[in-house]
Image (spheres, helix red, strand yellow):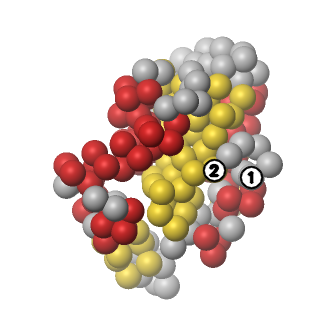
Amino acid sequence: MSKQSIKDSIRNIADFPQKGIQFKDITTALKESAVFHEILDIFADHYKNEKIDYIAGLDARGFIFGGALAYLLNCGFIPVRKAGKLPAEVLSQEYDLEYGTDKIEIHKDAIAAGKRVLIIDDLIATGGTALAAARLVQKTGASVAGFAFMIELSDLHGTDKLKNIAPIFSLITY
């Protein structure tokens, strides 16, 4: 299997969630076990020598890859949730949206200082959520070891916000 066959397994949905958007639907890739395995194997191979302590998966599709990759890399998994979803004391980080702001959170005791954290999500567009996750990781005293994305929408230049923080690995670029 190749990156092209993974790319071919992703469904495009026109005008979702709004007119003019070409939504990249990964569910068609995930439902095929061979494709899902290949995606995880590529990520695991890329990070196998990076001494990752935690994978921080962004709510919600980053959880799909994050938990499985944490298992493959024998490290912990940290869910980065939308505001109000975690039960214990949290650290929060606001970030800008096209119209307004949003907030993500992690448990305050989720990551120990000095640890190395890989941030993962299914897609990077403008980079706001990933940058907010990096700031959360840094608030704990840990370091961002890298950013991993299944899909990068390069025309939106989201990686420009991240490139001075840690290395970026995108499996597929549109």
Screen quadrant of the N terminus: bottom left
Tell me the residue at 41%/47% (across/down).
Answer: 42
Is residue 11 left or right of 91 when viewed as pictured? left
Q: Would residue 135 be found to the left or right of residue 30 on screen?
A: right
Nearer to us in this view, 164 or 129? 164
Give residue 64's position: percent from left, percent from top: 36, 42
Neighbours of disc 1 within 10 Å: few (<14), some (14-19), many (20+) = few
Residue under numbered circle 2: 168
Q: Total marks drawn?
A: 2
Instruction: Decide if residue 77 is in sight here.
Output: yes
Q: Position of residue 169 (x, y in %)?
A: 57, 51
Q: Residue at x 59, y 64 (%)?
A: 125
In the image, residue 161 above or below residue 154: above
Q: Specify the amino acid type for callout 1.
A: Lys
Looking at the image, residue 32 sits to the left or right of residue 54; the answer is left
The residue shown at (19%, 49%) is: 33
Q: CA distance from mark 2 to mark 1?
A: 7 Å
Residue under circle 1?
A: 163
Q: Earlier in the sequence, mark 2 or mark 1?
A: 1
Type of amino acid at the residue the image marks with label 2: Ile
Q: Are marks 2 and 1 in contact (CB under 8 Å)?
A: yes
SS state under label 2: strand
